[in-house]
Amino acid sequence: MFVHQHNASILWDLAPQENIRMNIVGPQQRLSTRLAFLAAGLAMATWAPLVPFAKARLGLGEAELGLLLLCLGGGSLVAMPVTGILTSRYGCRLVVLISGAVTCLFLPGLAFAPTPLLLGLTLLVVGGAIGTLDVAMNVQAVIVERESGGALMSGFHGLFSLGGFIGAGLMALMLWLGMTPVASAVALSALVAASLVLAAPHLLRDPDAAERDAPLFVMPHGAVIFIGALCFLCFLAEGAILDWSAVLLTAEQGLEAASGGLGYAAFAIAMTLGRLTGDRVVGQLGGKRVLLLGGVCGAAGFFLSVLAPSVPLALLGFVLIGLGASNVVPILFTAAGNQTAMPASLAIAAVTTLGYAGILAGPAMIGFVAHASSLNLAFGGLGAFMLLIAASAKLGAAAQPKPSA
C-alpha cells in the first residue's frame, strides 16, 4: 500500500526520475494523446483564414506574402530535430505543455502584427512551437500505441485532421459573424489551451525508459532514412493537393473558380474518415497490406484525377487519394518508433522533419514540373510516387503493433 501511494505521488513530478519506470499507459493516456493531436490540428487551422487579412492589413504583395508563408514551415523545420532530444531528456508532458503554451500565446499575434518583420518573427515562433508539439505528441503516440498492444496511430492522426476541420470551420464562422480577426484568433487559442489543459494530467511525464541514456544527437541512418523518404513522398503529395488541386480542376476540367476547392475538400474528408477508421483496418489487415493497398489506391486516384473525362470522376480521384494516403503516414510513424537503428524519439523527429520538408517542397516542385511540361504530368508523377510507397509495403510489417507484456 505504501509503495503504491509513493509511486503514485511520484507521477506528479515533472522532472524525470532515474531507475524508475513511471509512465502508466491506459485509457486516460490514450485520451490525452488524442486531445494533444486535436489541439495541434486546431492550432494549425488558425493561420490560413487570417492570411487574407494579414495581406490587406500590411499591404503585402504576392512575393512578400510568399516569403512570409515560408516562415511558418521554416520555424517548424528548425525546431523539430531538437524536439527528439528534449523528449528523450524531459519526457513528452513538459515539451507538449511548454510548446502548447507558446503556441497559444503567439497565435493571436498573427492577427495584429503591425509590420511584415514582426509578422515573420511571429510566424517563426508559432511554426517552431507547433513543430515541437507535433514531434512530442507523436513520440507519446508511439509509446502509448506500443504499450497498449494495438493499432492506435491512425486514430491519433485522425484527431489532428478533425482538429483542422473544426478550427477552420470555427474561424470561418466567427469571421462571418463579424468578429474581428484578433478576437477570432484569441477564441481559437483558448480552445487549443482548453484541449491541452484536459490532456495535461495524463500526458507521459518521463522519458521512455529505453531512451533516458540516449545520445543528444544521432545522424539519421538505416531504416529511418528510408522511412523518412517515404514520408517525404506522401507529404509532398498532400502538399500538392492543398495548393494545386483547384488549379487542376479549373484549368483541366473547366470547373468554375468558385468551386475549385471541391477537390481538396473531397481529399480532406476522405483522409479524415480513413484515419478515424484506420486503427480497425490496420488491426485486421496488418500494416503491410494497408501500406500496399494505400499506395495503390492513392496512385489510382492521381491517375484518375488527370485522366477523368468529367468533373465527378476527377473528384472521385481525389477521394481515392485521401483514402489511400490516410493511413500511410501513421503506419510509417509506427515503423519509425519500432525500428532499432536509433532511439525512437530521435527517429520520430527525423521522420517528421523530412515529412514537413515534403509539404514545403511539394507545391514548388509541382510548379516547376508543370511549367516545364504540364500539370497533368506533374500529378501523374505523384501517382508514381504513391506506387513507390506501395512497393515498399514490406516496411509495414515493422509497423504492426506488438502485444503489450
Image (cartoon, rainbow, N blue to C red):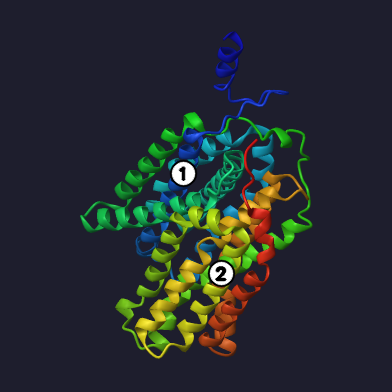
Decide if residue 99 is in sight here.
Answer: yes
**Residue 361 falls in image quadrant:** bottom right
Q: Does 21 sit above or below residue 368?
A: above
Q: Quadrant of the C terminus?
A: top right
Specify whether 106 is left or right of 89. left
- Residue type for callout 1: Arg
**Residue 329 falls in image quadrant:** bottom right
* Label 1, label 2: how far apart the Cα atoms are: 26 Å
- The location of residue 197, given as percent across then percent down, is 42, 33
- The location of residue 73, given as percent across then percent down, is 55, 58
Residue 293, numbered circle: 2
Q: Quadrant of the N terminus?
A: top right
Q: Does 310 sit above or below residue 301?
A: below
Q: Does 108 sit above or below residue 361?
A: above
Q: Which residue is identified by label 1?
A: 34
Label 1–label 2 contact, CB within 8 A: no
- Residue type for callout 2: Leu
Question: Could you classify mark 1 by the number of other residues whose Cα lies within 10 Å: few (under 14), some (14-19), or many (20 or more)?
Answer: many
Mark 2 falls on what kind of element? Answer: helix
- The location of residue 272, given as percent across then percent down, is 42, 59
Specify whether 157 is left or right of 255. right
Question: Could you classify mark 2 by the number of other residues whose Cα lies within 10 Å: few (under 14), some (14-19), or many (20 or more)?
Answer: many
| Residue at 44% across, 82% down | 248
Give the farthest residue toward the left. Answer: 177
- Closest to the camera, between mark 1 and mark 2, is 2
| Residue at 55% across, 44% down | 137
Q: How many marks?
A: 2
Specify whether 220 is left or right of 8. right
Decide if residue 352 is in sight here.
Answer: no
Mark 1 falls on what kind of element? Answer: helix
Q: Nearer the viewer, residue 43 or 41?
A: 41
